[in-house]
Amino acid sequence: MERIVVACLGDSITAGSPLWDPDAAVRARIGDQLDERSQWEWWAARQDGRLELRNHGVYGERTDQIAARLAAAASGAHVLIVQGGINDVAQHAPVEQAGRNLRAMLERGRELGLAVAVADVLPWNNGDARAARDIVRLNELIHALGAPVLPFHATLVDPERPLRMRAECTDDGAHPSIEGHRLLGEQAFRLPPVPTAT
């Protein structure tokens, strides 16, 4: 069975907050609550035995900061999954620039010969009306990038309150719960077409 290495590049949603982080020092601070199931990648890997999903999530990073780590994350990978934007919204950075940063990461991934996909932005239960508008706009931009989109937002959104995640999908209003990560990994993750070697 051929191994497919997937570089998962993003912020705390990719990292697995609040119960997991790829950084051992952060995991040590999480302590007794540490749970590797708090990663959508963990669940996605269980669905397809070919996949090696490498977690390159860093808590709190904006899209420009995520972009700075792309080359290191992409090394040895076949697929690049880009996720980010909520910290741009939280830090009042222009969402148009966040969209351009995401586009540039996807273009760079293609230049490196990788299959690429992008996740859209989850609802933020702790945000205000301005943040909700920015998330809607950023997701419009993401869906116009011309790359496969992992539907994170639609997978966890509360249909009764479309600016919020469903209660069972988040424990802190900002990050997926284990159940939320399970749904993202099992339902939202879709492997983009992987180029064949020539």
Image (cartoon, rainbow, N blue to C red):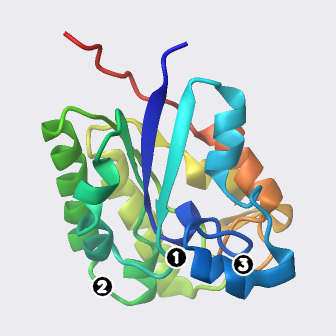
Q: Amino acid at mark 3?
A: Gly
- Ranked by sequence position, the earlier of labels 1 and 3 is 1
Which residue does the numbered mark 2 point to in the structure image? 93
The disc at residue 173 is 3
Q: Answer yes or no: do the residues labelled 1 and 3 have beta carbons within 8 Å?
A: no
- Of residue 43 and residue 145, the one placed in the foreground of this image is 43
Q: Is residue 31 above or below residue 194?
A: below
The mark that comes first in sequence, 3 or 2, is 2
SS of the residue under disc 1:
helix
Residue 125 on image: x %, y %: 67, 78
Mark whose residue sits in front, 2 or 1: 2
Q: Nearer the viewer, residue 142 or 184?
A: 184
The spot of residue 176 in percent (x, y) is: 71, 65
Q: Amino acid at mark 1?
A: Ala
The answer to whether residue 39 shows anywhere in this view is yes
Indicate the quadrant where residue 129 lies.
bottom right
Residue placed furthest toward the left = 111
Q: How many marks?
A: 3
Q: In percent of the image, x 65 and y 85: which residue is there?
A: 126
Q: Secondary structure at mark 2?
A: loop
Q: Earlier in the sequence, mark 2 or mark 1?
A: 2
Determine the residue located farthest toward the top in the rendered image. Answer: 198
Name the residue carrying label 1. Answer: 132
Q: Helix, strand or loop at disc 3?
A: loop
